[in-house]
Amino acid sequence: MAKRAQIIPPRPDLRRKAVNSTRGFDLKLPPEMVEKLEQVVHKARDTFTADIAARLVAMRTALREADAGDEDQQRALALIYANSLEIKGAGGTIGYDLLTAIGKSLNDFVIDMTELDGRRIDIIDLHVDALYVVLANRITGRGGPTEAAVLKAFSEVRRRFKEE
């Protein structure tokens, strides 16, 4: 049986620090601090973008080398899984919600996959292409109707060809 949550009120000294501007934090940031924070966010976005681009190159390279044999396929699938998981996690952090959605789609597609055939390689390629388009065109947020249609198509492709 689950216990009910207990709400513990803050100690008076913590409450005083939280609302007292002379001994606690000032809740209104000065313009200089806001500008510094915006610069940090923009620099982080550039770093994230470069990291995601490098991951896309690694996935594309691994996919090209996967034709050689079973061991190469396993290595490629592991790399694609790991990188798509990272992209899925990082996309929303920097405002690229479509990267998160497409990265999740790709991750869901390869999660239990043990071998690659031509059709699966094509589907993974399409996911990577879509990730490149989002990154290159700097499509932030959820996108529009075209992007929604692409995500819906990826869902259908995943459903049809995952178990084949």
Image: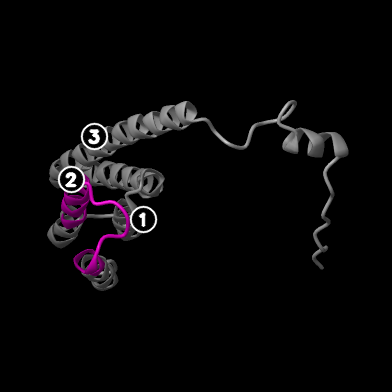
Question: Which residue is label 2 attached to?
Answer: 63
**Above or below for 56 versus 125:** above
Residue type at mark 3 is Ala
Verify whether residue 103 appears in magenta.
Answer: no
- How far across and how far down the image is residue 82, in percent? 36, 43
Q: Are discs 2 and 3 less than 8 Å apart at CB?
A: no
Q: Amino acid at mark 2?
A: Leu
Labelled disc at residue 54? 3
The C terminus: image quadrant: bottom left
Q: Residues within 10 Å of mark 2 (few under 14, many from 20)?
A: many
Q: Position of residue 6 (x, y in %)?
A: 83, 56
The quarter of the rendered structure image containing the N terminus is bottom right
The residue at the far right in this view is 12
- Residue 157 versus residue 163: which sits nearer the camera? 157
| Callout 1 touching callout 2 (CB < 8 Å) | no
Residue 144 located within the stretch drawn in magenta: yes
> Which badge, 1 or 3, is on the more N-terminal residue?
3
Identify the magenta region: 126-148
Instruction: Name the residue that disc number 1 marks.
Output: 111
SS class, disc 1: loop
Label 3 crowd (10 A; few <14 / some 14-19 / many >=20): few
Task: State the SS at label 3.
Answer: helix
Q: Residues within 10 Å of mark 1 (few under 14, many from 20)?
A: some
Query: As rendered, which of 38 and 122 lies closer to the eye?
Result: 38
Percent x, y of residue 27: 62, 37
Please state the total of marks drawn on the protein image.
Answer: 3
